[in-house]
Amino acid sequence: MLPPSLKNLIDQLSKLPGLGQRSATRLTFYLLSRPADDLNALAQAIKDLPQKIKYCPRCFNLTGDSELCAICANKNRQPNLICVVEDILDVIPIERTRQFSGVYHVLGGLISPIDGLTPDKLRIKELIARIKQLLAQKIQPEIILAFNPTTEGDTTSLYLEKLLKPSGVKITKLNRGLSTGSDLEYADETTLINALKYRH
């Protein structure tokens, strides 16, 4: 029988994605073997998350102490070139290519009625507000729809295209160098560079 504090840690870790009871148990016993200083540093890092990390009010990427995220605050980025992604994890591989000079808009999911994700639960209103703001300033935006090539990704693309077409904005999509069902997060850099370069 394990002590309650150990059992509690195993239970908490097993709630993390990709960690079942067995993996959580192994990880708990690994942590038990670490020096107290390492454990305190890890505990502090976890404790800091809700206090020191917030969402950028413009694109909904993550930011720390600054009001805007580093990408939105960068004056060298093109504010009229908006890459719309499903979640924050999709920003990382695109940034890694160093081929994209625009900004992002994190939707917070893809349309999937079966999972209860309807358009009103995504940050679509905020995207439209950004587009209207640019058009009011006589700036013509280009919206790049960069979703995973899945049914949900295609559904969300079609919905946004239909919604945005009347405003006359340029809408492009990543080239299908990405295989159907794949995930942007795991795409290699060359594939992503070509998908961005030959967007249509």
Image (tube, rainbow, N blue to C red):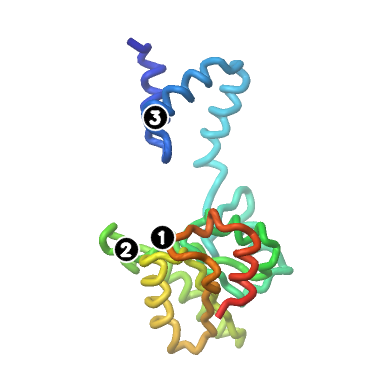
**In the image, is 34 to the left or to the right of 117?**
right
**In the image, is 70 to the left or to the right of 148?**
right
Rendered view: 173 above or below 153: below
Name the front one of labels 2 and 3: 2
> Residue 56 at what x, y percent from top left?
55, 58
Q: Can you name the residue that lies furthest to the right here?
A: 76
Neighbour tally class for label 2: few under 14, some 14-19, many 20 plus, Cα within 10 Å: some
Rendered view: 140 above or below 191: below
Residue pointed to by mark 1: 109
What is the number of the mark on residue 12?
3
Q: Which quarter of the figure has residue 2?
A: top left
Amino acid bearing label 1: Gly
Q: Which quarter of the figure has residue 12?
A: top left
**For the residues bearing labels 2 and 3, Cβ distance under 8 angstroms:** no
Amino acid bearing label 3: Gln
Structural distance between the alpha carbons of marks 3 and 1:
25 Å
Rendered view: 120 above or below 16: below
First reached walking from the N terminus: tag 2 or tag 3: 3
Q: Quarter holding the C terminus?
A: bottom right
Which residue sits at x=52%, y=66%? Answer: 178
Helix or strand or loop: what does disc 2 sit on? loop
Structural distance between the alpha carbons of marks 2 and 3:
28 Å
First reached walking from the N terminus: tag 3 or tag 1: 3
> Residue 41 at what x, y percent from top left?
60, 26
> Residue 137 at what x, y percent from top left?
60, 84
| Front-lying residue, 69 or 10 | 10
**For the residues bearing labels 1 and 2, Cβ distance under 8 angstroms:** yes
Q: Quarter holding the N terminus?
A: top left
Rendered view: 42 above or below 3: below
Which residue sits at x=53%, y=21%? Answer: 31
> Residue 185 at what x, y percent from top left?
53, 55
Residue pointed to by mark 2: 112
